[in-house]
Amino acid sequence: MTERIEHIVKHIHFDSEEEVAKALDHAGQLQDLTYEEKNDLAAAFSIIFYHHDHAGITAMGKLAIRAEHLIAGFGCDVVPFLLGELINADSESAAYLGKAIALNPCPNVDALLQAWEENWDDDFAGINIIQTLSYFKDPDVVKAIPQILVACKSANFQVRAMGLYTIGKLALRLDPGVFSEELLLSMFDTVFTMLADSKPLVRKNAARSLGKMQKRGLLTDKQRLQVLAAFKAILGTDGQHNWDRAFIVRHEAEHFLPLFSSRPAMGDRYRQSFKILAKKELCEKTFHFVIEAPMIARKLKAGQFIIVRPHDHSERIPLSLCGWDVDRGTIEIIVNTVGKTSAEINALQVGDRFIDIVGPLGQRSHVQAYPDTCVVIGGGYGTGAIIPTAKDLKALGNKVIGIVGARSKDLLLMTQELAAVCDEVMITTNDGSAGIEGFVTDALQQVVLREDVSYVLAVGPVPMMQAVSKLTEPLAITTYVSLNAIMVDGTGMCGACRVSVGGKTRFACFHGPDFNGHEVDFEQLMKRQKMFVKEEREALYSVEA
């Protein structure tokens, strides 16, 4: 064990949450770890998985989650160690080990299957491995499903139950396109048969998995009717059978019954609710929304945008994304009241729904590993739009500095969220009420004077993006700006969002929204942005009146 690793390990005291947190902080700062160092740290921190009360979310439990992410970041080098631990771990500790394996960027589905084959006679090892497979989002895990289906027929009811549980989890996690028709048929036949199992836990997980398969649109109409009839029998509502004596089975059938009770219309499997799940006022006339849109969330990339309509009679307006959650199936937007449609959006409340949202649209941000510092700049509500790109840049190993500008302190947005994905955040306000008194270009000037910069992204008012581009052009710093041109269809067909870049006509919705800031004709862009100012003011007045 090297000296720097030994220094960390000997200070880990599992009766002291503070000491464990310090050790995790220290380990997370280490660079250029060797194979042996990674495994020594993995062995040391994995002990947390066994040394805390698994009931509820405790402080040590949160540290265990940090440890699983740290260990996962060590890559392929620690996979053999994790597999060795997983085989012999208790079920609660195996959950942390399994997530560390599933989060690991190393392609390790084959390694898991090999370990399963080598321990096929050990039911408890099999349960731990099957549970680990349920955490995977990598489409490659689909190759494990035939073996999981075999486990669903095991003589051990706990193995059967875990196999069915995992089938349901993967049905929700994976894109429907990864399942072949033959595999879907095998999944249905196996899971449906288990509704008649003698063990309530097995029947419960079978009912749950069938519900999740229907939720993801993986069942045919014939299969849907079969499950509907079975669920009615479980609940005793078909007039022919007594209900299932196990409450946990009846509960699952009752919960998912609405998904099977009526014939879905064509295209229902592709329909999203666009329901507002959360709304928060960030500052005057500016709100943050969390919206249910699972299909959009699964496809989004940093820099892309959406086009929304709050109701049947509204116009369609483009909006940037400040975040999304694939697992929850949600997207996040920030809306500032500047016109009629944005005012109508900000009048919506939690539980209301957008009539439609189209996306993701446009191209992803230009992100890669750069040799020098990357700077992301947000002006006003443009701050939210730079967060996904900053996160991607940081994930690629770049040093990322965020710059946020606003007229005054009370108009600053999402600074904490940006700080979570940057190495440093600099704040500027016009009136000096917070951070640097001045503009974002003043902060950028400070950065370029003290260190080399390879990349700049600016999102916000057009004059701000133009000023940033003018500053970076003589320094030959790669600079992108996100153009908020007037749009109609969002696919490049109408031509309303045309902009001039490098002397050529480009469509902001299709070729952008990010363009080389040194080539954008900002004067033409600003003229086009003012085309409907009078009409917009009249429309907004009618809403406020």
Image (tube, rainbow, N blue to C red):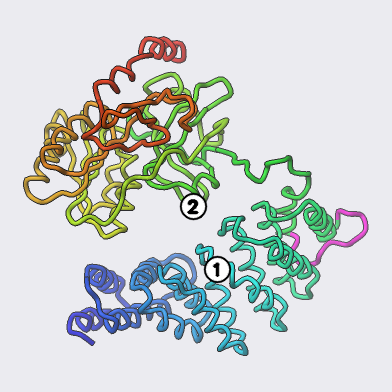
Task: Tell me the amino acid under the disc marked 2.
Answer: Val
Q: SS at mark 2?
A: loop
Magenta region, mostly helix, strand or loop? loop
> Where is the C terminus found, in terms of image quarters?
top left
Q: Position of residue 240 (x, y in %)?
A: 93, 58
> Pointer 1: residues within 10 angstroms few (<14), some, or many (20+)?
many
* Mark 2 to mark 1 CA distance (whole Å): 17 Å
Q: Is residue 121 above or below residue 401?
A: below
Q: Is residue 309 magenta?
A: no
Relative to 375, 201 lies left or right: right
Front residue of this view, candidates 145 and 198: 145
Q: Position of residue 132 (x, y in %)?
A: 52, 73
Marks 2 and 1 close (CB-CB < 8 Å): no
Relative to 432, 482 lies left or right: right
> Where is the N terminus found, in terms of image quarters?
bottom left
Q: Tell me the residue at 47%/24% (across/down).
A: 494
Magenta residue span:
237-250
Number of numbered discs on residues: 2
> Pointer 2: residues within 10 angstroms few (<14), some, or many (20+)?
some
Front residue of this view, candidates 215 and 141: 141
Q: Quadrant of residue 356?
A: top right
Q: Tell me the residue at 17%/84% (across/down).
A: 3
Q: Position of residue 95 (x, y in %)?
A: 49, 73
Residue 208 in sight: no
Relative to 241, 249 lies left or right: left
Label ID, residue 141: 1
Label ID, residue 326: 2
Q: Tell me the residue at 45%/76% (across/down).
A: 97
First along the sequence among labels 2 and 1: 1
Task: Tell me the amino acid under the disc marked 1.
Answer: Val
Q: Position of residue 413 (x, y in %)?
A: 29, 37
Q: Is residue 10 above or below residue 186?
A: below
